[in-house]
Image (cartoon, grey):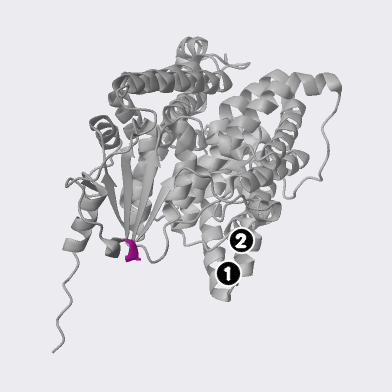
Amino acid sequence: MSTQTLSSPPVRPSFVELYTPKLVTVLREGYSFANFRADFMAGLTVAIVALPLSMAIAIGSHATPAQGLYTSIVGGFLVSALGGSRFQIGGPAGAFIVLVAATVQQHGMDGLILATILSGLMLMAIGYLRLGTYIKFIPYPVTVGFTAGIAVTIFSGEIKPLLGLSFSGGEPGPLLEKIPFLWSKLPSFSAAALALSLASIALLTALRMWRPRWPAMLIVVALAAAATAFLKLPVDTIGSQFGGIPRELPMPALPQLSLEKVQAVLPNAISFALLGAIESLLSAVVADSMTGRRHRSNCELVGQGVANIASGLFGGICVTGTVARTATNVRAGAHGPLSGMMHSLFLLLFILVAAPLASYIPLAVLAAVLAVVCWNMVERHAFATLLRASRGDAAVLLATFCITLFRGLTEAIVVGFALGSVLFIHRMSQTTAIETHMPLVADDMPDDGSRGAYDEASQQDPTVIVYRISGAFFFGAAASIGTVLERIGETHRHLIVDFSAVPFVDSTGARTIEGLAHKAAQRGVSVYLTGLSAGVKKELAVQGVRAPLVKKAFSIEQALAQIRSKRPTPEAPA
């Protein structure tokens, strides 16, 4: 058995090790035809999902559907080729819709492209300065809150195409102004567009429930386009609104540059970089939890930066790692980054061969696709759990959610992080008050009969590993502690995590343990938690860390005894 205390940092890797793309790592491992076939099929599967999503997100962002495809083709290819995640799929993301649309309204399309390129430079700088790790310090309630706020804001922007409302000019941006304005335009709704939207949402939901492996979005978009063409439905389509999709990639070009323009779009670029870093690393963590692999945060951000610069040069919009498409890639059996590169090539093939068919796609069905995406973006279970967890977590969650809705995403993240820090200080002050009787340095104590005899055999068991966590397990420490805990050797079958020296755990730390337990279960490793105080045990239980996912014991010795008692007794030799 090996025992480790989470205190000293691991040996720092070299620059080359940190910034070697995962593509190079996979090819060094040896790449067979079977691996290529797996990546080919996974890339095709992801392309089928990405095709309607890329166009829908671009339209929702006040860009053209072609720009969404350019983003997935150019940006997605480079994210997979240069990034630090083995399974990451890059492309336009729903979380960016609000920011991109606001940038287009304020600065025009040239301003959006310039902001995208600047955000790429910022992401590269963040990666090379090795600041990617700090992105993980954002508290869990903040990520749940701003994701839910973004989803509501996106949905409010899709009400017009969902209902087929007809009015000249744009709609107001702020939510409190937009809803009354759209309500006043309700008499102009289109029955055909509304019926198409409702039918699309119903079919998407049904396919998700009964045929989850089918490409539901592509099926629904194709059926809606066919119905619109053959029945000559009076609804807006990609062809009527945008004139179709070009059958070629544009040549790379720089937007109009001036110092005044750079200064004007700089706040937007900072927002793009901040959200892009958060979204891409969250997506990489999801892929890690599904596969047991580990991404390189700073290399991933450098790859994301290069992808955004290239996307802007080819007329695309912001590109980032996308959770849904990355998860689809993993479930489709991808072996490595070539699957993401193949997904981009399949989308390029669509532009070269079948672009004219996209002209028949009605905007109502793309709005329906985004409405379902918004529903899936909201982590409803996590939202409800955090509301019940504690008043502090609920306050951080609701503040981030409301500020995202009524002020802006960047302000929401800053305020949420500040509230999370204040909450941490408050909890630490409470913990300190409770434990003031404990001396700073433990006094020497005589041996007595309370301590059992030393069992030297316990240190020789190669199937058991023990980690002892010392100090507060909060959002600032969750990333580093989680990284260490994930380093479970192939021979280990039992993991014991001792919390005797942990005064409290916040929701981010509890989620880290929950993710660790699920990953360990996939590898056949049983997890024992020992030394839990009442407060730590309650917080872990609220986040789902309970039996049968984990086992609990009063001490490390009791956990070892439980492990030994479950092993079969070897038969005596005949």
Which label sits on residue 338? 2
Which label sits on residue 36? 1
- Residue drawn at (43%, 52%), measured in percent from left and top? 486
Along the viewing direction, whichever of 280 and 225 lies nearer the viewer: 280
Between the residue at mark 2 and the residue at mark 1, the CA separation in whole angstroms equals 8 Å
- Residue drawn at (39%, 56%), measured in percent from left and top? 213
Mark 2 vs 1, N-terminal side: 1
Q: Is 462 included in the stretch rendered in magenta?
A: yes
From the top left corner, tell me how far across and down residue 219 is, in percent: 46, 50
Q: How many badges with numbers are in the image?
A: 2
Q: What range of the chain is rendered magenta?
A: 459-463
Q: Does 163 sit above or below residue 528? A: above
User: Within 10 Å of the Cα at label 1, are there few (<14), some (14-19), or many (20+) other Cα atoms?
Assistant: some
User: Within 10 Å of the Cα at label 2, are there few (<14), some (14-19), or many (20+) other Cα atoms?
Assistant: many
Q: Does 173 sit above or below residue 450? A: above
Left-right relation of 65 to 544: right
Q: Secondary structure at mark 1?
A: helix
From the top left corner, tell me how far across and down residue 310 is, in percent: 74, 44
From the top left corner, tell me how far across and down residue 111 is, in percent: 75, 26
* Residue 60 visible in rendering: no
* Residue 267 visible in rendering: yes
Q: Quadrant of the C terminus?
A: bottom left
Q: Secondary structure at mark 2?
A: helix
